[in-house]
Image (cartoon, rainbow, N blue to C red):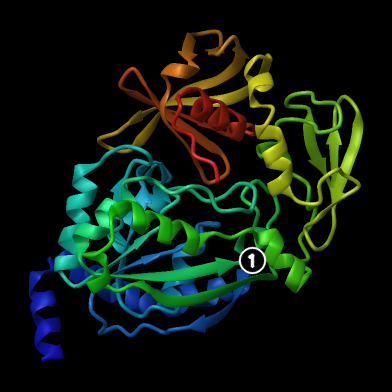
């Protein structure tokens, strides 16, 4: 009976999908080898076999290794939902589109095609991988999930499997210039909601269950483990996250040098120790620091600052960047003005739609039906926070 079901699933798949299945099986040992060089995975809970019935697997989102960490303990073929902006990187585009066959979706934007693809893949016997936050954390704690998650899951009528991760952020902080080669992540896999239970739950109840299940603060985890991740120059790159100095309250003056956190106006404000905690600062972790700076977001919005970015317009059909060159970004009075010797572009923050940070060096958004992408950017997080706050869609726990 089981083999008959597998045959039916395979018969529904295209040649490209079957080729992808074979390639993924063949490269799994290679991916596992490189994963082990970066992160040691300590797993507990269920190991899900290749012949399991289709399900949706969810997880908290820490870094770009997350999909591989999940796949390590789930043998069944998974089709992950991935942000379409990641496709702008050519090697990733090739891997995601032709090998992993990911489901392309724009973060924060309703996407009927992506939802149809989820149902199609489930019908073909694949499982679906979803990170309900829609983005990986900058500060080390999970963020709110999207409201439509519960509605989608209720309609799929398959089991919801949880893979809870801890330690991944501190191994490789999203903002950091340097990642640990001694990373450690703990994972635990279990069935969160049986398909029979979905019928009796509302979409809101499903959201609540999921949000509670994936909730994690890596600093709380680290207080128990106290791993030395042996990360070099631990503070460098912190300006990607920190936009307010918590000593003098100045905006975009904080940067990292070696292990030290410095402010260009008031000097050293702390350092990051070998356990990734802050010392010599009012806060000992970046989750609390981020809560502090967000509490001052209105002061940031009323400030003025500037920095330099590469500016691109995104061809959303071909998913390629069309470069407009290096621009100076000047912010004042809720307006971003980007200029060079060839052009000037103005963006009212409150009219920006679908802001998203991709990896560490990209900030994209829609403005008057055009998708823009700023790359080689060191201060994308402050733009993201201001956009989300002013357009009224920002969710925080």
Horizontal side, residue 299 vs residue 340: left or right? right
Q: Residue at 13% of width from left, 76% of height from top?
A: 10
Is residue 241 visible in the rendered image? The answer is yes
Is residue 180 visible in the rendered image? The answer is no
Horizontal side, residue 234 vs residue 111: left or right? right
Horizontal side, residue 363 vs residue 199: left or right? right
Q: Residue at 78% of width from left, 27% of height from top?
A: 253
Give x and y (percent) for residue 7.
10, 82
Q: In which quarter of the image is residue 168?
A: bottom right
Give x and y (percent) for residue 357.
50, 39
Give x and y (percent) for residue 119.
17, 59
Q: In which quarter of the image is residue 126?
A: bottom left
The residue beneath circle 1 is: 167
Query: In front: 11, or 134?
Result: 134
Q: Quadrant of residue 354?
A: top left
- Up/down of 258 relative to 50, above or below: above
Query: In front: 78, or 211?
Result: 211
Q: Residue at 45% of width from left, 77% of height from top?
A: 189
- Up/down of 324 relative to 201, above or below: above
Give x and y (percent) for residue 360.
58, 43
The image quadrant where one finds the N terminus is bottom left
- Up/down of 151 relative to 6, above or below: above
Q: Residue at 33% of width from left, 85% of height from top?
A: 49
């Amino acid at each position: 009976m089981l083999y008959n079901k597998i045959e039916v699933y395979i018969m529904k798949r295209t040649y490209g999908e079957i080729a992808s299945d074979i390639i993924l099986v063949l490269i799994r040992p290679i991916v596992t080898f490189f994963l082990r060089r970066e992160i040691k995975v300590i797993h507990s809970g269920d190991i899900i076999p290749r012949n399991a019935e289709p399900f949706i697997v969810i997880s908290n989102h820490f870094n770009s290794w997350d999909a591989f960490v999940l796949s390590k303990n789930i043998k069944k073929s998974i089709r992950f939902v991935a942000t379409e902006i990641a496709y702008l990187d050519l090697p990733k585009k090739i891997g995601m589109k032709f090998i992993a066959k990911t489901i392309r979706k724009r973060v924060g934007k309703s996407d009927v095609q992506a939802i149809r693809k989820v149902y199609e893949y489930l019908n073909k016997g694949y499982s679906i991988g979803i990170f309900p936050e829609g983005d990986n954390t900058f500060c080390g704690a999970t963020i709110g999930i999207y409201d439509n998650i519960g509605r989608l899951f209720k309609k799929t009528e398959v089991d919801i499997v949880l893979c809870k991760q801890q330690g991944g952020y501190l191994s490789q902080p999203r903002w950091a210039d340097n990642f640990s080669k001694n990373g450690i992540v703990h994972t635990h896999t279990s069935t969160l909601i049986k398909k029979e239970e979905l019928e009796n739950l509302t979409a809101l109840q499903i959201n609540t269950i999921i949000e509670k299940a994936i909730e994690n603060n890596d600093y709380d985890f680290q207080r128990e483990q106290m791993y030395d991740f042996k990360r070099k120059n631990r503070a460098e790159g912190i300006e990607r996250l920190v936009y307010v100095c918590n000593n003098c309250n100045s905006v975009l003056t904080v940067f990292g040098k070696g292990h030290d956190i410095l402010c260009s106006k008031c000097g050293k404000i702390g350092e990051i120790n070998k356990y990734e905690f802050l010392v010599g600062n009012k806060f000992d972790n970046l989750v609390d620091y981020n809560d502090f700076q967000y509490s001052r977001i209105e002061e940031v919005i009323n400030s003025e600052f500037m920095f330099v970015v590469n500016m691109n317009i995104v061809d959303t059909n071909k998913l390629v960047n069309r470069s407009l060159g290096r621009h100076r970004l000047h912010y004042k009075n809720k307006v971003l003005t980007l200029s060079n010797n060839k052009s000037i572009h103005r963006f009212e923050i409150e009219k920006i739609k679908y802001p998203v940070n991709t990896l560490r060096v990209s900030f994209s958004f829609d403005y008057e039906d055009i998708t823009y992408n700023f790359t080689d950017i060191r201060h994308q997080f402050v733009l993201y926070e201001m956009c989300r706050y002013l357009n009224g869609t920002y969710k925080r726990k």
